[in-house]
Image (cartoon, grey):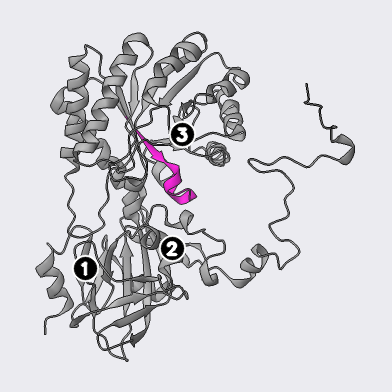
């Protein structure tokens, strides 16, 4: 019977630059994972920090090559989409590469201020502020603008600009407008709820931005949920957006930039092999062609890559703790964690990841289902991106079997409620950061220990210092006034 490594080698081009096998064990970016497991145990979340910088520099190279090939006269600015992962180690690693930031919530702003205090960002760092903004968000942004930070609020609705009219005291304010794109044909809605519809953009500019001497419209923002992909839908929406840019640029000389959003794909299968350079070449070629056709200077280009920045740096490692044959043909490998809590996209969106065993690559293989620890029947993983079946090495009672899910670095912690309460009180696993020193030697450090029961007791209100007691109001809340301060109900009958 063939071994597991035979199966992989006949299915994929293996080894790859990222994955290879030595002594029957898997290496991830040349990191021997069994060494990490022996030191830290499982379940385990792992972040390989050098991958973040590698992707940032690769993206810059793709745009640089495309600009040179097409003699493109604009500039390129790389922003990181913070909502993909807000962790300090991600932001600080990315900021080593002279990037800029995109935010989506009022709670991003204290993080910006802390990064500034640490000297990781400067007042010249672009802060592209996206999202539907409630009062606290516009207040925080206005305070940054008044202090001289390089904040560009991206208007998401027609009333948002009124907050800056009232709160911004700086001499000038650069603004962007997010345009509401049509959704993919199979989506539940026709047009995105986010952004301002095409028909309202010109009126917003003419009535609210142009008359105000301190406002400048500098950027139009484009983003679709599918991300960047070679499809008729993507090219149609990008073309429509660029024609709107050209129309607006002719009436607004200050407009000189576009944000084409994020969405550069990451590998979710060993079979996936994206030609990133070709993708970027085609985007630049299309933008330049439309601008030339309309006699408009090409715009400076911003991107806000999130998953592409951090996704491929992450991995989750489990131990198989039991084998259960539930009928004549359905064999379950039970893991010491949960897919619902640790990899919520695999449950909520049927997202697939690169899944590989860590050890026993020379063993024969069999079809299996992977089962998580929660009592939910949906806590399983049993297919791969390239196949309806999932195969794992056969192992004996005397052997341990470990498995890894790779490229899990974006969104999973925030969607899973990191450090909070999760289904069946499955605890958050230990999180280890893997780096390399100046000589290329592997270093590790523990970012977070496994979640303990005491932290859950506090969150659930079984301790006096329960987190539900709050000293200050949060977004959307106001302090309850004293009884003497409550105004009488106004008479509205007139």
Disc 1 to disc 2, how far (Cα)? 32 Å
- Any magenta on residue 311? no
Q: Is residue 114 left or right of residue 445?
A: right
Quadrant location of the C terminus in the rendered image = top right
**In the image, what residue occupies the spot 21% across and 35% down?**
280
Residue density around tag 1, few if under 14, some if 14–19, many if 20 or more, within 10 Å: few
* Foreground residue among 325 and 301: 325
| Residue where numbered disc 1 is placed | 388
**In the image, what residue occupies the spot 70% across and 64% down?**
461
Q: Position of residue 326 (x, y in %)?
A: 33, 86
Quadrant of the rendered structure where residue 477 is?
Answer: top right
| Residue where numbered disc 3 is placed | 130
Above or below for 58 versus 368? above
| Residue where numbered disc 2 is placed | 432
Q: Nearer the viewer, mark 2 or mark 3?
A: 3
Please indicate, yes or no, whether residue 427 appears anywhere in the rendered image: no
Q: Residue furthest right?
A: 484
Above or below for 317 versus 305? below
**In the image, what residue occupies the spot 43% across and 24% down?**
176
Region of the chain picked out in magenta, as a range: 77-91
State if disc 2 and disc 1 touch (CB < 8 Å).
no
Q: Which of the two discs, 1 and 3, labels the residue nearer the N terminus? A: 3
Q: Position of residue 303 (x, y in %)?
A: 33, 34
- Any magenta on residue 80? yes
Quadrant location of the N terminus in the rendered image = bottom left
Q: Which of the two discs, 1 and 2, labels the residue nearer the N terminus? A: 1
Residue density around tag 3, few if under 14, some if 14–19, many if 20 or more, within 10 Å: many
């Amino acid at each position: 019977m063939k071994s597991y490594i035979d199966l992989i080698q006949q299915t994929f081009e293996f080894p790859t630059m990222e994955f290879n096998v030595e002594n029957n064990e898997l290496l991830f970016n040349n990191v021997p994972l069994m060494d990490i497991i022996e030191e830290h145990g499982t379940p385990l979340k792992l972040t390989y920090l050098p991958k973040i910088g590698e992707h940032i520099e690769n993206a810059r190279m793709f745009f640089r090559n495309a600009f040179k090939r097409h003699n493109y006269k604009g500039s390129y600015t790389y922003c990181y989409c913070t909502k993909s992962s807000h962790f300090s180690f991600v932001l600080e690693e990315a900021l080593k590469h002279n990037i800029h930031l995109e935010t989506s919530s009022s709670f991003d702003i204290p993080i910006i201020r802390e990064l500034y205090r640490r000297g990781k960002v400067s007042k010249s760092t672009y802060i592209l502020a996206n999202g539907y903004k409630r009062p606290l968000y516009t207040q925080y942004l206005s305070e940054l603008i008044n202090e001289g930070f390089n904040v560009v609020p991206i208007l998401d609705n027609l009333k948002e600009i009124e907050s800056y009219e009232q709160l911004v005291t700086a001499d000038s304010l650069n603004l962007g407008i997010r345009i509401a794109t049509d959704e993919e044909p199979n989506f539940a809605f026709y047009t995105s709820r986010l952004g301002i519809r095409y028909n309202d953009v010109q009126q917003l500019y003419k009535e609210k931005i142009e008359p105000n001497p301190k406002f400048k419209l500098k950027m139009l923002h484009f983003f679709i949920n599918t991300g960047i992909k070679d499809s008729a839908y993507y090219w149609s929406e990008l073309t429509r957006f660029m024609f709107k840019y050209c129309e607006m640029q002719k009436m607004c000389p200050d407009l000189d930039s576009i944000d084409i959003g994020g969405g550069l794909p990451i590998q979710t299968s060993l079979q996936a092999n994206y030609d990133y350079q070709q993708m970027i070449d085609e985007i630049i070629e299309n933008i330049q062609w439309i601008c030339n056709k309309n006699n408009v200077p090409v715009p400076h280009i911003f991107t806000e890559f999130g998953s592409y920045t951090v996704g491929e740096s992450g991995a989750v490692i489990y131990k198989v703790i039991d084998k259960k044959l539930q009928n004549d043909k359905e064999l379950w490998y039970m893991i010491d964690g949960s897919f619902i809590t640790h990899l919520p996209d695999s449950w909520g969106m049927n997202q697939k990841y690169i899944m590989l065993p860590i050890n026993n690559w020379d063993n024969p293989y069999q079809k299996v289902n992977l089962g998580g620890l929660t009592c939910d029947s949906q806590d399983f993983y049993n297919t791969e991106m390239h196949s309806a079946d999932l195969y794992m090495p056969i192992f004996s009672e005397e052997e341990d079997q470990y498995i890894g899910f790779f490229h899990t670095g974006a969104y999973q912690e925030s969607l899973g409620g990191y450090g909070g309460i999760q289904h069946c009180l499955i605890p958050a696993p230990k999180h280890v950061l893997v780096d390399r020193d100046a000589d290329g030697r592997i270093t590790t450090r523990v970012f977070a220990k496994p979640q303990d029961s005491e932290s859950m007791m506090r969150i659930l209100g079984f301790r006096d210092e329960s987190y539900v007691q709050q000293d200050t109001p949060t977004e959307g809340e106001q302090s309850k006034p004293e009884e003497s301060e409550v105004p009488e109900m106004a008479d509205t009958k007139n």
